[in-house]
Image: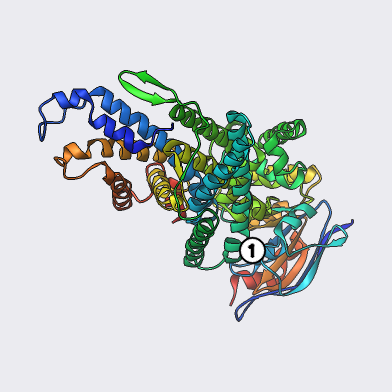
Amino acid sequence: MPLPVTIERSERIRHPLREEGPGGGGPIIASVDIFLQQLINGLTLGSIYALVALGYTMVYGILGLINFAHGEVVMIGALTALAVAKMLAAAGLPAPLVLLLALAAAALVCMALGATIERVAYRPLRNAPRLAPLITAIGVSIVLQQVAMLVWGRNYHSVPQLLPAGSHEILGAQITEVQLIIMATAALTMLGLMQLVNRTKLGRAMRATAESPAIAALMGVDANRIIMLTFVIGSALGALAGVMVSANYGIAHYHMGFLLGLKAFTAAVLGGIGNLGGAMVGGLLLGVIEALGAGYIGDLTGGVLGSNYQDVFAFFVLIVVLIFRPSGLMGEKVAERA
Amino acid sequence: MSVLLEARNIGKSFGGVQALKDVSLAIAAGEIYGLIGPNGAGKTTFFNVLTGLYPKDGGEVIFNGAPLPLGSPHEVTRAGIARTFQNIRLFANMTALENVMVGRHARTKVGVGGAVLRFSRAREEEAAIRRRAGELLYYVGIADHARKLARNLPYGDQRRLEIARALATEPKLLALDEPAAGMNATETAELKTLIEGIRADGVTVLLIEHDVKLVMGLCDRVAVLDYGEKIAEDVADVVKRDPKVIEAYLGA
């Protein structure tokens, strides 16, 4: 069984070391294993945030547009992968093959979806005031959510176990195979993306278009094509993230993209929106902040607030960043644009 | 002497302001052609129309024997016109080498899709792009700066980089918009040598410049714009003595 994070967390709260200690409102003694456990959970979650945040930040970097429908693309990816996986698993294919095919199907669907959204919803508004595409983005987001609800229903779908279920112990903390695979895949994907952006013709064209569409066009870069490909790549990353999220939590539903999207957007802003490295750092950081926050909030508030307040941290971070460092940790590009 | 570019009755207005009035001129292949005039005379507007950045209101441009597709900057580049900007417009956050490599886009065939999949042809092309970009940096004299971000280059070298990027598109006509602006005497002299070298290598040059001394010393022929109209066009020495030109610069 994949480990739903909430269950795991309650296990940690019942950890023997802590229960033996003086209970209640005593000073917090950060025991290494709990800290490490939350760090592992946080990095897993953060890897996923980072992948989704990249989708936001790439589009922002090139168009100056917040694609609020991106969270929904992630959701469609998760549900598509789930549908395909169930079908193929019923046909008796081996689990790794099912997973790969489901992932490929999700990626293809999301890439097509991303390209369609760009073409239909954003390109006609390329030269409109910035508020217009923003509202369109929210509209697209609602439409996608409703369509997903019609197709997949309102229920939570449990995700079949396709990854190995084992776990390893390091320094008293548990790291599951699923977590390891998520982190490794995310790291490799991001490495690949950096290579693509920094070492290929396409990447160069993307960066040139992001800096100055008119001059890039003058150099023979087809801006429309580059912009569409940016959406396509971001959507593929989103599909992967969707599959990861449903594998990590063991569930998928039509509404899952909303909060995830907002958090990934927060991560992108935290890192400095428009900056690829920033999205990665911001994603990981946000995941860790959330996990540590959720792990310690009970102690910090004397039990008044529980780990279900986890979501508060992301938006607290967003507010703090917007007040004190609106250009984000690594976001000098935004400052230049403004 | 064959005509490379012929502009016929180019007109352009912004709101009520007529920025260009029926401007016609012809540039011969292999010459350095100067376009001068007081501030606001329409020089840069002419450049922007010529390179497809501004839509023209009237007239046409024949380039290399065919009408220039002014609707698309990209097509203009492909047809063989490259330009630099009065206010330098490099890709500031890319390296000098990458800036020039982007310039190769107009002349390379493997699509971006191929580049993603890294077919061997794409890889060969990438190597060729890199090599050519390196040569061009060397050609304009800033090979040492290849790996620096464009925005970190000294001002004069940014101008050179812009020229290298323009040359990367393999232009028949290189249009330079005030390349000597902000340069000291030494830098200007070096620039003059560079432009002469570019012409010697077979590229026709169209030069907008404020530095009259540079224009007169460099250009084979000069046209003078004033209030959007061409008031003179001839070899430099004649234009210099034209009373209309003297009046435009000094009088009224």
B56 left or right of A185? right
Image quarter (top left, top right, bottom left or bottom right) of the N terminus of chain B: bottom right
> Which residue is the site of mark 1?
B44
How far from the left and from the top, in percent, is residue A102? 60, 39
Q: Three-letter amino acid code at disc 1? A: Thr
Q: Is residue A56 above or below residue B123?
A: below
How far from the left and from the top, in percent, is residue B237? 75, 60
How far from the left and from the top, in percent, is residue A203? 61, 41
In which quarter of the view is residue A128 placed?
bottom right
- Between residue B175 and residue A218, name the one nearer to us: A218
Q: Residue at x 52, y 62 (%)?
A: A143
Near mark 1 (Cα within 10 A), the count class, few <14, some 14-19 or many ≥20, is some
- Between residue B231 and residue A129, name the one nearer to us: A129
The residue sitting at the bottom extreme is B16
- Between residue A50 and residue A62, name the one nearer to us: A50
How far from the left and from the top, in percent, is residue A250? 44, 38
